[in-house]
Amino acid sequence: MDYIRNDYETILKRKAAKEEGSYTCYLFEQGIDKILKKVGEESTEMVIAAKNNDKDELTGEICDLIYHTLVMMVDRGVTIEDVEAVLHKRAEKSGNLKEFHKVDKNS
């Protein structure tokens, strides 16, 4: 998953050094509302692609969602390491299905 880390680093650089014509810079200039709108749009498009059972379309939409999520992370100050730490904690909770359903009965 070096691609995700590399994309994150590129997005950090674009936020710091405003590059003319950069879509990433455009998103930062527009602000969090625009970034969140794109995350929402890409989430919906990913769900539709999955429902349509189109692997190529789904793969592209997943990539779009990851990119826009990374932009949101940079904007909000969430690092790759922050996410990895939470994933690590969750991985330690293997076999907790019964406990999970006690907490969230709607899942």
Image: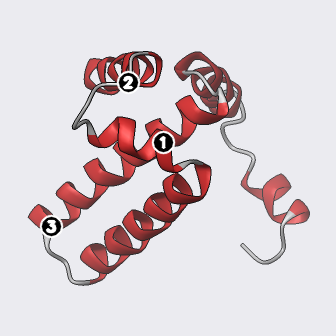
Amino acid type at circle 2 is Lys
Q: Does residue 76 sit above or below 104 in this rendering?
A: above
Image coordinates of residue 17 in percent, x first then y, are 39, 16
- Counting residues from the start of the chain, the first of labels 2 and 1 encountered is 2
Image coordinates of residue 102 in percent, x first then y, are 89, 63
Which is more toward the observer, 20 or 93? 20
State the quadrant of the N terminus: top left
- Counting residues from the start of the chain, the first of labels 2 and 3 encountered is 2
Which is more toward the observer, 65 or 30? 30
Residue at image location 38% in from the left, 26% down from the top: 11
Q: Does residue 60 sit above or below 15 in this rendering?
A: below
Labels 2 & 1 near each other (Cβ < 8 A): yes
- Seen from this angle, which residue lies furthest right? 102
Image color mode: secondary structure
Labels 3 & 1 near each other (Cβ < 8 A): no
Which quarter of the figure has residue 41?
bottom left
Q: Could you tell me which secondary element the residue under label 2 belongs to?
A: loop
Please indicate whether residue 5 sits to the left or right of residue 78 in the image: left
User: CA–CA distance between discs 3 and 1?
Assistant: 29 Å
User: CA–CA distance between discs 2 and 3?
Assistant: 31 Å
Residue under label 2: 18
Residue at image location 41% in from the left, 47% down from the top: 68
- Counting residues from the start of the chain, the first of labels 3 and 1 encountered is 1
Residue under label 3: 57
Q: Could you tell me which secondary element the residue under label 1 belongs to?
A: helix
Residue 70, which numbered label? none
Residue under label 1: 29
